[in-house]
Amino acid sequence: MRKFYIENEIGSRLPLNGEQGIFLSNPAGLGLTMPSAFADIHNGFFRELSKDSEPQSTVTGDLVFIGDNAYADYRSFVDWCSGSESLRLIYKPYGSTEFYRDICLSYLTKTELTDTRWLTVPTSLACLSPWYRAAPTSMSMSTESGYVLKYPYSYSRDLIYSSSSAGSMAADIPAGGHIPAAFELTYKGAIVNPQIKLVGSSSNITYGICALNTTLADNESFTVSTFYGRCKVEITGADGIATDALNDVDLAYEPFPRIPVNEDCVLLMSADSEITGQATVRVYYYYRSV
């Protein structure tokens, strides 16, 4: 059975499947809407003008508040949504895989109790993102010995190698989704001038490099995120306070690359010092419809 939830920015979620007296019925807007602009090139042939443009989607339905406390449950729901800084709709169409979508509450049309003492509230949710995988793919980056890379790369003077005997670190990232995937890399430990590079494993194309001119101690960390709408480079000090480090990034390269949908990639990290810390990568796959 399909399931829905609403979750806020701190991970608190409300089930919309009747567990707490709220059920989402008649959901609509879960499908796919593609752009309809085409050029007529004659003789029955047409060319699509845009593949990236997509109208903003809206998910609609009826929130049904069940039981003797329908009005009180409705008020609690409104209070919870109004007190949240951001909301996400979680959709589990089948199985155990959950998909997230950033949303904004457009309206709740409060009605009267029905004969069954249920309160049916027509609802509209404006979508702020496509669907994306609820549990990001996680992988630990493993240290490569010497200057050996995980793929048979041809030599290029643009390649960045580690200057230490520890070599570089690498993580395989498989292609997936309907829109180029974003990633978030976090490294904790001592390092000097780290460079993060995304390379196509088949084409050898460099999709971007995030090169930081900075030095970190053992108890510090940095994060590079290419999440849509929230790209960032942050350094977290020993006190746990994160600061924007974009001024330390070499903007001669594309610092926020994303994984193409049609090619596996490798994420490489090198530095001007030995890499002794640990890094993890979370990959976010996006879908137009699930």
Image (cartoon, helix red, strand yellow):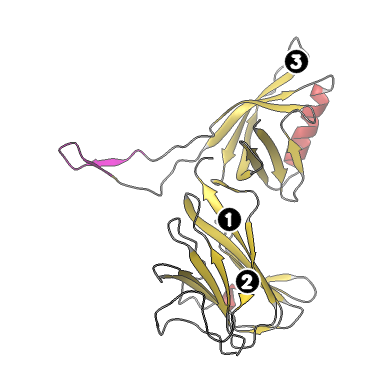
Confirm whether the magenta stretch covers residue 161.
no
The residue carrying mark 1 is: 284
Residue 144 image label: none
Q: Earlier in the sequence, mark 3 or mark 1?
A: 3
Q: Earlier in the sequence, mark 2 or mark 3?
A: 3
Q: Residue lying farthest top?
A: 115
Amino acid carrying mark 1 in the image:
Tyr
Density class for disc 3 (Cα within 10 Å; few <14, some 14-19, many ≥20) is some
Residue 77 quadrant: top right
Of residues 172 and 271, which is closer to you in this image? Answer: 172
Find the distance from the CA under tag 3 to the CA under tag 1: 42 Å
Against 215, is 46 above or below? above
Of residues 289 and 55, which is closer to you in this image? Answer: 289
Percent across and percent down for residue 166 are 62, 86
Q: Earlier in the sequence, mark 2 or mark 1?
A: 2
Amino acid carrying mark 2 in the image:
Met
Find the distance from the CA under tag 2 to the CA under tag 1: 17 Å
Which residues lie in the magenta part?
A: 36-47
Against 270, is 30 above or below? above
Say which residue appears at 56% left-offset and 56% top-offset.
229
Mark 2 vs mark 1: in front: 2
Residue 113 image label: 3
Residue 141 image label: 2
Of residues 102 and 1, which is closer to you in this image? Answer: 1
